[in-house]
Image: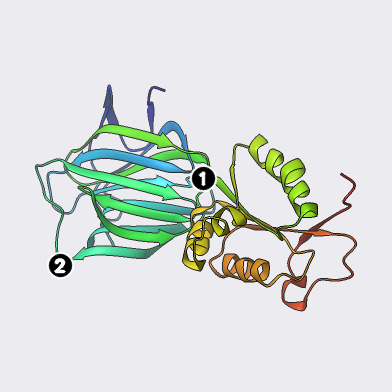
Amino acid sequence: MKTNWIALYGKVDVSGNSIKHVPLPVPEDAPPQPAFTLARSNLEFENGTISFEVLIKEPESKCQLGLNHGHETQYYLGINLAGAAYGIAIFKNGQWEPVASAGFNDKPPIEQWIFLRIRVVGSLLDLYVNDVKVCTYSGSVLKSQAVLLLQGSKEISVRNFKMETSAPECFVVMQFTDEFNMLYEEVIKPTCESFGFRVVRADDSYTSGLIIEDITRSIRESSIVIADVTPDNPNVFYEVGYAHGIGKPTILLSDRKRDRLPFDVSGFRTLFYDNTI
């Protein structure tokens, strides 16, 4: 798909797969700050990799990729954030919060192309600079059109903007018995796939002989967790607790035949079903 850019604020020159920040004079009554541009693309992103090259002409210039634009919590990843050469920040309720930084007491190079790559897998956000991973953060990325925030008193050029999307992953946690196998195969898996998710069940990892670190990594790399908490299964509750602990969006399911849920999960919204399949 061809990449289109529209400046929501400021001015950009677009030519092919290149975009250039054109500084505009700051009004006299405005607070002193370098001119900035906020440009939105037509490409929607949720999971995968975005890469591009950027060239700045002064060490203070900023170039950041924005994710979740238009949502309550937005993420910005790139160069010159919070006093560091590279970093990740959250923008929420009109406030900036740096969450990961690298390159303190340093500045990004000028007059040479810098290769930036942002990789999102589930709730993991990784920032690479010239193929070196410099920052990582755990957050929830929602499908939205990617934006570029460019700020500086001189031109900033971006070229070779590429987006490679991958299907978000749903990690399913449940007891491994025939009854729940049927629920998984007949209901959960086809429903998730109809919404574009790649579905992985916890026993896919167990049967491969993987250890608990691989299970927790699978939870981190998933976009959502679905857990059936009908039986009192320690493995299920451990994985649900881990998912809740890292803020992973989690859907709890339970058969109505269960009298009541354990106290620690009873406060979470649960979808109760009648197993009539």
Where residue 84 sits in the image (x, y, percent)? 23, 63
Q: Would residue 262 be found to the left or right of residue 200 on screen?
A: right
Label 1: element kind: loop
Q: Mark 2 or 1, which is nearer the eye?
A: 2
Where residue 147 sits in the image (x, y, percent)? 39, 40
In percent of the image, x 90 and y 47: which residue is there?
276
Instruction: State the residue in front, 135 or 84.
Output: 135
Above or below, 267 relative to 108: below
Instruction: State the residue in front, 115 or 201.
Output: 201
Q: Earlier in the sequence, mark 2 or mark 1?
A: 1
Q: Amino acid at mark 1?
A: Gly
Where residue 173 is drawn, which disc sits there?
Answer: none
Where residue 185 sits in the image (x, y, percent)? 72, 43
Q: Residue furthest bottom?
A: 263
10 Å crowding of disc 2: few (<14), some (14-19), many (20+): few
**Which coloring applies here?**
rainbow
Q: Would residue 154 be found to the left or right of residue 93 on screen?
A: left
10 Å crowding of disc 1: few (<14), some (14-19), many (20+): few
In percent of the image, x 32 and y 38: which residue is there?
10
Q: Amino acid at mark 2?
A: Asn
Q: Would residue 87 be found to the left or right of residue 240 on screen?
A: left
Q: Would residue 222 be found to the left or right of residue 176 on screen?
A: left
Distance, label 2 to label 1, CA atoms, is 33 Å
Quarter-of-image position of residue 50: top left
- Is residue 191 something one can see in this rendering? yes
Q: Quadrant of the N terminus?
A: top left
Label 2: element kind: loop
Q: Which residue is mark 1?
A: 70
Instruction: State the residue in front, 130 or 233.
Output: 233
Q: Which residue is mark 2?
A: 105
- Is residue 24 something one can see in this rendering? no
Above or below, 141 relative to 155: below
